[in-house]
Image (cartoon, rainbow, N blue to C red):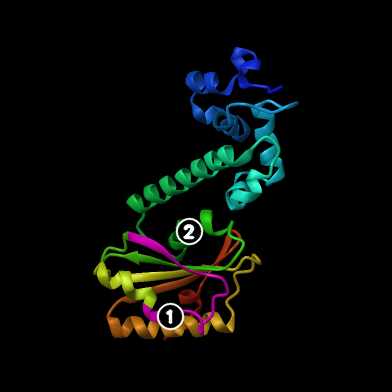
Amino acid sequence: MRYRITDLQKSERPRERLAKQRAESLSDAELLAILLRTGTQGENAVQIGTRLINTFDGLKGLRRAAYEEVCQQRGIGPAKAAQIKAAIELASRLNSLETEQRQTIHSPQDAANYVTHEMSGLEKEELWVIILDTRNRVIKYEKLYRGSINSSQVRVAELFTNAIKLNAAGIIVVHNHPSGDPTPSTEDITLTRSIVDAGRILDIEVLDHIIIGGKEHVSLKERGLGFR
């Protein structure tokens, strides 16, 4: 026996509520229920959505969870897991597009605000490069490295490849510390110095290196670390 959203009273069905009250009025679980469409034995789609939110500790955890992990949840399976992961990825891409279209970087805080929403939820270290035009407007950003970030593993030239192609005026390097502590390490400072030196040779200004730790950040430029 399967429990469907149509088993709920009409006024409580997520799809009908969305049509009348707009998507913003629905909870995370109800939005997931619209994607799931049907429930399973003992649970309707809203209840499954609630269970997923609780199991993965919110949408951020569901975004980080592997596709296979979502598949293994009772009442999900490959098709529904794919729908959930696809919807979350579309939302992430839309957020990135909207941010790129409006964002101008005036300060380390602006740079941190640009990446913190996505970067604070990462479980591994990643290094990204924000590419800027002459007015410090974001041309694009790219995710280049994932794993342990240190000066021996990062190919500095690679950080400038697209900046050169796009005739960029400057870049901002950002990476995260999954521990939540954004304090720069000796390796971070060494890497920054190498990037800044390369930027001078290429005539592309390295405006900053930002480290994200949870909701906190550190600007190596502000602290004079690696910049001279």
What amino acid is at disc 1? Arg
Residue at point 31% right, 70% down?
A: 163
Residue 226, horizontal then vertical, whole percent: 47, 83
Q: Does the magenta stretch include residue 175?
A: no
Write down the quadrant of residue 207 in the picture.
bottom left
Which mark, residue 24? none
Tell me where the magenta segment starts and ends, as one range: 139-157
Residue 119 vs residue 96: left or right?
right
Which mark, residue 155? 1
- From this viewpoint, which residue is outermost toward the right? 42
Residue 20, horizontal then vertical, whole percent: 49, 18
Q: Do the residues labelled 2 and 1 touch (CB within 8 Å)?
A: no
Nearer to the camera, 196 or 127: 127
Residue at point 32% right, 83% down?
A: 200
Residue at point 32% right, 65% down?
A: 132
Residue 102, horizontal then vertical, whole percent: 34, 50
Instruction: Say above or below: 213 vs 90.
Output: below
Residue behind mark 2: 115
What amino acid is at disc 2? Val
Instruction: Say above or below: 110 vs 93.
Output: below
